[in-house]
């Protein structure tokens, strides 16, 4: 299942996956620098929840 997070310093959306030996991550998209951190974290949470729901289907 893909988990999403926000890198606040470069303002990027990051996707990560657990492999059993560690995690892998990749940059997904740049984010607007003027966006509130709580909105970005909400985006990451919502995308992770969507990924979880898709994984279960």
Image (spheres, grey):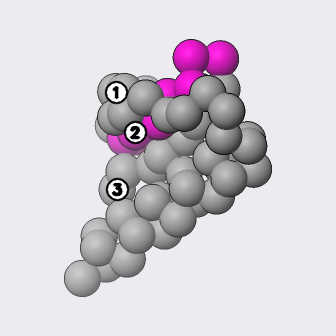
Any magenta on residue 16? yes
Q: Residues within 10 Å of mark 3 (few under 14, many from 20)?
A: some
Q: Position of residue 16 (x, y in %)?
A: 41, 37
Tag 2 secondary structure: strand
What residue did someone put label 3 on?
1
What residue did someone put label 2 on?
15
Give the residues drawn in magenta, as a range: 9-18
Split into 4 quadrants, where in the image is the N terminus? bottom left
Q: CA distance from mark 1 to mark 3?
A: 14 Å
Residue 35: image quadrant is top right
Q: Earlier in the sequence, mark 3 or mark 2?
A: 3
- Would residue 20 be visible to someone looking at this image? no
What residue did someone put label 1 on?
26
Q: Is residue 42 above or below residue 8?
A: below
Q: CA distance from mark 2 to mark 1?
A: 6 Å
Q: Nearer the viewer, residue 47 or 20?
A: 47
Q: CA distance from mark 3 to mark 2?
A: 10 Å
Q: Position of residue 45 (x, y in %)?
A: 58, 59
- Would residue 10 be visible to someone looking at this image? yes
Q: Residues within 10 Å of mark 1 (few under 14, many from 20)?
A: few
Q: Is residue 32 left or right of residue 16?
A: right
């Amino acid at each position: 299942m893909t988990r999403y997070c926000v890198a606040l310093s470069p303002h990027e959306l990051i996707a990560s996956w657990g492999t059993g030996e560690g995690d892998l991550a990749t940059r997904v998209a740049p984010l607007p620098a003027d966006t509130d951190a709580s909105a970005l974290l909400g985006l990451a949470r919502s995308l992770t929840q969507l990924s979880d729901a898709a994984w279960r289907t």
